[in-house]
Amino acid sequence: MTGTVTNQVTGAPAVSTTVSVVRDGASIGSSTTDAAGNYRLGLPAGAGKYTIQVAQLGFATASREVEVVAGGTVEVNLEISPVNVDASTGKRLPSGLVEGGPRDVVIENKQLAMAIAKVSNDPQLSQSTTGKVLDLAITGQPDQLDWINLPYVSTAEPVGGNAWAQLQTRSNDVQVVENSGTKAVVRVTGTSAEHPGLKIVTTYTATPDEQFITAATTFTNDSAAALSVWAGDAMDHDGPGSRSAVSGFAPVTSGGPFSQVPNANRWIAQAGTSPDNQTYGLIYTAASGPFTGYSQSNFTMSKFKLELAPGAGHTITRKIVAASNGGAADKFAVLNQIPAG
């Protein structure tokens, strides 16, 4: 051990808080605070510059760069405060269904938190997990989703009970591009395994007081030939009592998958029977174009048909919602209160 960082984290809740040491963008060690916020953190990678970071769900991430000499000790005080908006690594959502790890990106505001895969891989989305939503929950509630396959793109129309299993999107870059305290933005860049000339860029944006995070995906045809593809998103609910719905239609609790053209509210959604009463939805803007919902009880998806001339692009924008349904008989009515835009 070539150096040590010690001192205190203030403003934290009365629980152990993780303090991490980061070098070259990766966590190389961590410790936890005691009841008074004190910590001691060893630096095993040699003398040099490090970032000391505190990442606690529900609080804004705090960090400080330090330089440590061999055998030296540095005192670092870090203060955290309740989150306004934040996008950072080092956080994890609660519940046994959570898949995102400390090296994935969590974007959150005052109402909800969401994990975006940076390094984690879901076997069901093998080679296509990067940049996708792994966890989502109302602040303080457990995650009830497996994942959101956002976005998929396919030459053939997805059909059947495994229609959700579209693995053609290949993203190689997940970056926090803004974390100003009033807005948090994460950008994911990739392409299509079937069409390498199809550029796919998704931008996730959180602002403080909304019950949603906005995700805008732009598909750009950089090839010399026209492309005709299907695109959209698929949600997989893993909590108890899973059911799916498309705006304007009764929930699907068995059978299917069913094709349903949404009404003007333009959403697809899932919910369950857990006492946390969470409803998860994707609400699409009118500018995203027409789409069809496609649902079984445990998954729902959207299907957009895109015709892209050489050099042309198309943007699908949706609000990713985690909202309380209040235990109402209609678990999806809450989504009608959020305008599609």
Image (cartoon, rainbow, N blue to C red):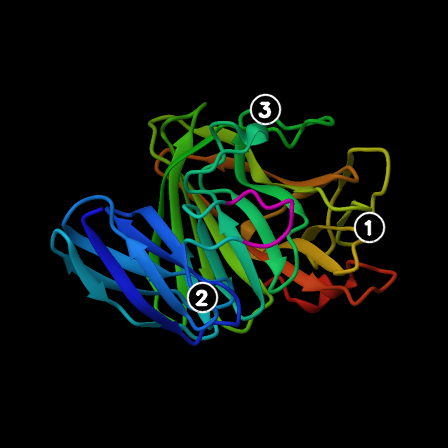
Left or right: 330, with 55 as reference point: right
Which mark is drawn over residue 249? Answer: 1
Residue 209, relative to residue 144: is it above or below?
below
* Residue 316 can be seen in this image: no
Three-letter residue code for mark 3: Ala
Q: Are marks 3 and 1 in contact (CB under 8 Å)?
A: no
Q: Label 3 vs label 1: CA separation?
A: 26 Å
In the rendering, which numbered label is found on residue 231?
none
- Which secondary structure type mostly characterizes the magenta part of the structure? loop
Q: Which element carries disc 1, helix, strand or loop?
A: loop
Which residue type carries mark 1?
Answer: Phe
Residue 99 placed where, x, y %?
56, 42
Q: Is residue 209 something one can see in this rendering? A: yes
Q: Which residue is mark 2?
A: 34
Residue 76 image position (x, y, % from top left)? 26, 68
Q: Residue at x 20, y 53 (%)?
A: 3
Q: Kindly identify which residue carries mark 3.
A: 156
The span from disc 2 to disc 1 (Cα, nearest Å) is 52 Å
Q: Residue at x 62, y 27 (%)?
A: 157
Q: Position of residue 6 (x, y in %)?
A: 28, 64
Mark 3 secondary-structure assignment: loop
Please tell me whether residue 314 is drawn above or below residue 183 in the rendered image: above
Q: Which residues are magenta?
A: 93-100
| Badge 3: residue crowd in 10 Å (few <14, some 14–19, many ≥20) | few
Q: Residue at x 46, y 73 (%)?
A: 84
Lower position in the chain sequence, tag 2 or tag 3: 2
Q: Quadrant of residue 252?
A: top right
Looking at the picture, which amino acid does disc 2 mark?
Answer: Asp
Label 1 environment density (alpha carbons within 10 Å; few <14, some 14–19, many ≥20):
few
| Tally of marks | 3
* Quarter of the C terminus within the rendering: bottom right
